[in-house]
Amino acid sequence: MKHIIKNKVIAAARKAMDAGMLVSGHVPEMEIEAPKHDSQGDLSTNFAMVSAAIQKMAPRKIAEAVIAHMEPEDWIDKIEVAGPGFINFFLRPSAWHPVVDQVLAADDRYGASDFGKKERVQVEFVSANPTGPLHVGHGRGAAVGDAVGNILRFAGFSVSKEYYINDSGRQIRTLGTSVWFRLRELAGHPVDFPEDCYKGDYIKDLAREVLDREGPDFISRDEDEAIDVCARYAAGRILEQIRYDLADFGVTFDQWFSEQSLYDSGRVQRSIAVLKKEGRVYEKDGALWFRTQDFGDEKDRVVVRSNGLTTYFASDIAYHQEKYERGFDRVIDVWGADHHGYINRLAAAVMAFGKQRDRFQVILVQLVNLLRGGKPVQMSTRAGEFVTLKDIVDEVGKDAARFMFLSRSYDSGLDFDLEVAKQKSSDNPVYYVQYVHARISGILAKAKAQSPEMDVDFNRGQYLSKLVAQEEIQLIKTLAGFPEQVEKSAAACHPHVIFTYLMTLAAAFHAYYNRHKVITEDTELTLARVSLVLAVKKVIRNGLFLLGVSAPERM
RNA sequence: GCGCCUGUAGCUCAGCUGGAUAGAGCAACGGACUUCUAAUCCGUAGGCCGCAGGUUCGAAUCCUGCCAGGCGCGCCA
């Protein structure tokens, strides 16, 4: 509808110019949008205002000239000039009816587009160290990364979702040490458990498993070797659990990428060699420094420590170089907000490898405030006391958790109240939206039962001219807005745009539902309304799908 | 001190690539179930858009400064 209006405006402007009422034929970028108030019509354009400078005319004069040359249409009621020069279009219901048909025809592709032009995008998210279970913060990152991937894919990007496994380095070693100490405890050797080791109960479980597998003689193994065995076993098991928990949360990846593999393949050393060759690094105090300041970082960063070990940064450089070599046009990393200090140095690395800055993007997800009935839930990672993602999914369910995580912009901190997420009421947005889907399913089932000859699933927008109620037109207008919202959400990588849209659509439906019966005595009206609610059902489902939330037939 | 994020109704937040009279949910108050699911709806009330300048025909939106909160500033990951 918007581009039809836009074309009409352009055509009218040309005619106005031919008639000598406008001086320039130049058509600037204009907006066609739905005004906030009904008194301002159904659609509105700022064409006259943005043309004022070019035409050297008052906006309202331009608007009047354009309207005067507009071809009349039977679906346009009237066109007005308003405010500083807006051109407002008041449409008849027939203008909106084709939308229902479009939704039904496109079905699960309604809202999809080629906006991304198949650009290859990698979205890397979660990427938690396999040293312990995923916690709440990881949950938000997982929900965001997964939804961003879904949305970009739907908007025509070629998307790959990836998990980077930090299975190398000191933390894994610490994990091994933690298990080893607990294992010795189990075997009856009193130990002084180190302060910097992982303290959660899961470490004890892992120690028990290692002991069972390796047998009692394991205790007398060389400590260095034993820690290594513990580390490898524990990391493997924890990663397995992470995969499982993510799958339960509805998150799957196209690729799991091991940090260790970058070392094994010599990739890290090669990247460092390239930096050396290109003079990007220098030695100071026995360490090797990367001149990240040349690319806008606040200070240079160490890639090889004076003890000869590489830093985490070194493998990250190699990893990101490898991403581009795999052919991705754009790389998006989803990180917790506490890692923001890391962006500039990695961006420097990307630029050092000759990539444009905008091909690397970091989505910083702000922290989650976990509450229970309004009161903060106390957590201490050091003491190993924290609420895991699994705990949350077990308590409130996957759908409620995901919807809650995606309800706000990730730029803002998020209050996640377990009590609210569990409530089956209007306090809980997920049910508000899912309820629409379930309600419509109920209606369609009843319609089918009453008139078996009416095949609602193959309904193709019949008797749509019967749809004239204000709530019906409002509902169709909202349906018409979905593709644009998907595009907006994709362009900004903001999943909450879809959340907000779904809430709006749900509200429009509930308002309609409470005012009008779908199944009436009038067969034609009933068929028209069945088409309409079927279209609503499909759009709700498509939107929920993008957020990774299910659309239930019954509640 | 420096950097990133945030500041909008009592609370939680949308709106931020500039547009008309700033929106939603919760909480408060008053209504609607003989109905295709009341997990819903309708109404009322609630605002120096943190403060001060600037740019603009027009600023919650862009720029600058300040104030407040969160996070970060390692040869850790």
Image (cartoon, grey):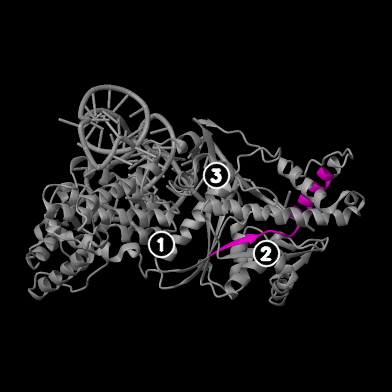
Quadrant for residue A104, please give it. bottom left
Q: In the image, which is nearer the foreground, mark 1 or mark 2?
A: 2
Would residue A180 appear left or right of A86 to someone viewing this image?
right
Identify the residue position indicated by label 2 in the image: A258
Residue A413 image label: none
Secondary structure beneath label 2: strand
Residue A367 image label: 3
| Residue B64 vertical position relative to residue A11 in the rendered view, above or below | above
Quadrant for residue A546, please give it. bottom left
Query: Mark 1 belongs to which subunit?
Result: A
Query: Mark 2 belongs to which subunit?
Result: A
**Residue A296 appearing in the image:** no
* Amino acid type at image mark 1: Ala
Q: Position of residue A54 (x, y in %)?
A: 21, 68
Q: Position of residue A9 (x, y in %)?
A: 16, 67
* Amino acid type at image mark 2: Ser
